Amino acid sequence: MQNSRLPNQEIADILVSHQSMPGNLLPILHAIQDSIGYIPQDSVPEIARALNQSVAEIHGVISFYHYFRQTPPGKNTIRLCRAESCQAMNGKSLEKYAQKQLKIDWHETTSDGEFSLEPFYCLGNCACSPALSVNKDVYGRVTPERFDEIVASYRGVVE
Amino acid sequence: MIKVYISRDSTALSLGSNQVAEVLQQTALDEGVDIELIRNGSRGLFWLEPLIEVQTDSGRVAYGPVQISDISSLIAAGIFSGKEQHPLYLGDIEQLPYFKNQNRLTFARVGVTDPVSLDDYLAHDGYKGLQKALDLVPKDIVQEVTDSGLRGRGGAAFPTGIKWNTVLNVSAEQKYIVCNADEGDSGTFSDRMIMEGDPFVLVEGMTIAGLAVGATQGYIYLRIEYPHAYEALNQAIQTAYQNSFLGDDILGSGKSFHMEVRRGAGAYICGEETALLESLEGKRGLVRFKPPLPAIVGLFGQPTVVNNVISLASVPIILDKGGQYYQDYGTGRSRGSLPLQLAGNIKYAGLFEAAFGMTLRELLYDYGGGSASGRPIRAVQVGGPLGAYMPESQFDTPLDYEAFSAIGAVLGHGGIVVHDDTVDMAEMARYAMEFCVEESCGKCTPCRIGSTRGVEVIERIVQDMQKEKNMNLLRDLCDTMIHGSLCAMGGMTPYPVLSALNYFPEDFGINIDADAA
């Protein structure tokens, strides 16, 4: 996720490589977020220029989609499923437990910068609810004890 | 060389199948046993994952659920020769009733083959459908699909052949095949399992669709929540290109079809087909007015087939074995099979592909084994967050589109979320409205504002504030949302709300007997 190259150069390269792709805005935003972890505010005018759209249009798209973020995430992103299947298996108490343990609310990052917590509506792991994911790893049948183990295993580890 | 299978399916991974695979491989190496480890899809019997299957002379022998700590005892007991002296021994998994009694048409290869191996795909009837399609004129391909009775598996159940025929009959410079892989409904995972466990079948299905309607470009719009499916699909597409199953000259036929995967970005509404098209075009996922239908004015203004993953993945077997073969399964106007997904509070959660017609009760108890908690099942939500909650008195409904809609329920994508008797149905109703607040695209007022008002009104009812007045208001609001919304998001959010209210009024603090007296 982290990249040693300057973000500005990275973004310029992404804009060039996606130039001729039809419907390229989402792929561009994904490429930027994949590469530097979020979509920096000051990249919006650049994207707008490259696509011949207004800054408002680009901002409108970024803010429409829950996945895109404009602030740097923690080193690890925990996504907790809040949908019905997980609710049927004590998902709500897991939500409360996670927030208490991490001492943060939804969309926040722990003070040490290790973890961000995002609500998710279905990870497609409904046969093993409740589910969460850390970065790209999915976990099923998560109990409070298992939550602690999972979190501990990522502490100090960068994706 | 002994062939050993351990799943790479996301759910198996979520239970530690990668760690089991690593330890097994290392232990085999240490013991000097020569194994070939294949990372297959999942059979969908998730209470048995992580599952190890070993190829023996008498078939594939399974062990599960396996934890790392079980591996040394499994090896000592003779797992590599399929010995049965171990508590985790299951025998031939295909003989377990849960598996044996399924009709695996669309899921024929899932859990059996190596998902990204083209050789394995070809050895298990892969690309036979495309071979047949290449010999047919477009009209006849469409006819075969029409004859099969296949209806859209995404939820709306619109006849696939009719949709294709519309696109076939519009002349245009460019047409598109768009696969809706934005499987956002809670309790559904069949699209994910196909894409992770047999990605070639989707590639083949889309290619056939392209030949059928004269489209040369396909897009899979995949939700961001499925990173493993993204990898598997990209691998399959790349392999298909390398072997002339995609490209400008498919298998020397001179026909062309190209495809790529595009990722969504966490907006539930993009599972609605017109919002999905907007998103593919690089815009906010705002729902479009219909008409015009996407079949006539779709992606980039061109005629477009938008089909769900399972619909497209069912096409290869229809072309291979004929429309009649597929249509011989099922009941009434619901033909073929539906991959049902048992989720939530259920003992044997998993995928169960069955011909239409079995009852919900059979599925929940004979196969699902009742609730996971051991408590009575109180409510079941079928068809995702926009589906109605069904009480026990409706469990004898057969699983078919018309039978469900006759009682105001929705079979939809076949996802079934089970709740035991600890569920608070007023809270579930409130949540349904809250989800709509969160995920509404905002284009139409009944959905955008109605959902917010819905949350407030339900909260007032639960807090016993002017109960009767607010009950009437809620029903009135639901009526407005059903009849005034542009798409199913606002139009169907009232389904879970009203069914909760009608079948579980006591959770809203309403005592029917007292009211009647």
Image (cartoon, helix red, strand yellow):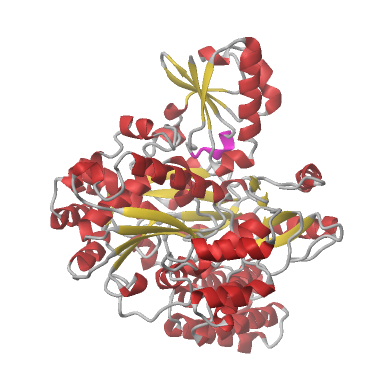
In the rendered image of this protein, does residue B473 appear above or below residue B54?
A: below
The magenta stretch is B44-48
Residue B420 placed where, x, y %? 62, 54
Left or right: B66, with B489 as reference point: right
Residue found 20% across the figure and 48% down from its top: B323
Question: x%, y% of residue B212?
Answer: 21, 56
At x 58%, y 28%, the residue is B64
Height in image: B481 above or below B431? below
Residue B502 at x, y percent in the picture: 53, 72
Q: Residue at x 56, y 87 (%)?
A: B472
Residue B65: tell me if it is visible. Answer: yes
Query: Residue A88 versus residue B305: which sits nearer the camera?
Result: B305
- Count of numbered badges drawn on the protein: 0
Quick check: is B39 in the magenta stretch? no
Image height of A82 relative to B131, above or below: below
Horizontal side of B108 relative to A105 (left or right) equals: left
**Can residue B357 be seen by looking at this rendering?**
no
Q: Quadrant of the C terminus of chain B?
A: bottom right
